[in-house]
Image (tube, rainbow, N blue to C red):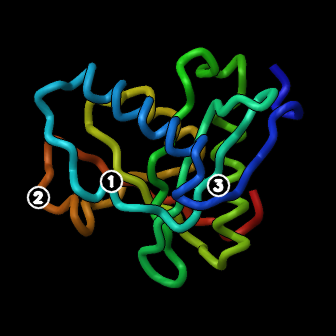
Amino acid sequence: MSTQNLEVRVTSWKDPDGALLRLRQLEETLSEWPDEPIPPASLDPLPTVVVLLKEGRAVACGGLQPLSTRIAELRRFYVVPEWRGRQHGVSDFLLQQLEEEALKRGYTTLTLELGIELRRARAFSERHGFVQIPLYGPYIGAEGISVCYEKKLLNPP
């Protein structure tokens, strides 16, 4: 699939397509880890959300949560299962769009938190220049559960 055929929508938390994708993400998470509590921060509204659409159908989303004037946390990054994988390029394209949006908003650093067991997500992040950092903010004390990353956005992606 060519990512040229994807529509990029920079929107708000209330966007219905973004809400649908977040619901799918939550359902998928609960089916894989039914006994894990959902962190309250996972439900907090994000001021900036990017939704990707293919022929009018939402296929991916992600958001930016400001942590300071120069740092934003990458949150709720999700691609529907049928569009995952390098052969599609949707995850790469979504990250690129989020990085561009972060730069437009004055952020120079992106951070993110991942479950320590999410090996593919961790490899994806590392492949895209994220480096592991100490646990921060609400993740302090989550050793063995979470891992945190950051990426400097000094140049446009």
Q: Quadrant of residue 33?
A: top left
Return the mark for residue 98.
3
Where residue 116 sits in the image (x, y, percent)?
26, 37
Q: Earlier in the sequence, mark 1 or mark 3?
A: 1
CA separation in Å, label 1 and label 3: 19 Å
Circle 1 packing at 10 Å, graded few (<14), some (14-19), many (20+), is: few
Question: Quick one: SS at disc 2?
Answer: loop
Percent x, y of residue 5? 87, 31
Give the structural element (helix, strand or loop) at label 3. helix
Please state if 84 lies on the left or on the right of 104 as rendered: left
Q: Position of residue 49 (x, y in %)?
A: 59, 56
Identified by mark 2, the residue type is Gly
> Which amino acid, mark 1?
Leu
Between disc 2 and disc 1, the foreground one is 1
Q: Residues within 10 Å of mark 3 (few under 14, many from 20)?
A: many
Kindly identify which numbered label has been placed on residue 141: 2
Q: Are marks 2 and 3 in contact (CB under 8 Å)?
A: no
Q: Measured from the top left, where is residue 54 in percent x and y?
A: 77, 29
Farthest right residue in view: 4
Is 90 placed above or below 84 here? below
Query: Is residue 126 placed above or below 103 in the rendered structure?
Result: above
Image quadrant containing the C terminus = bottom right
How much space separates mark 2 and mark 3, taking CA atoms? Answer: 28 Å
Q: Which residue is mark 1?
A: 43
Q: How many marks?
A: 3
Q: Residue at x 57, y 38 (%)?
A: 127
Observer-nearest of 114 and 8: 8
- Cα separation, mark 2 vs mark 1, equals 20 Å
- Name the image quarter holding residue 118: top left
Circles 2 and 1 in contact, beta carbons < 8 Å = no
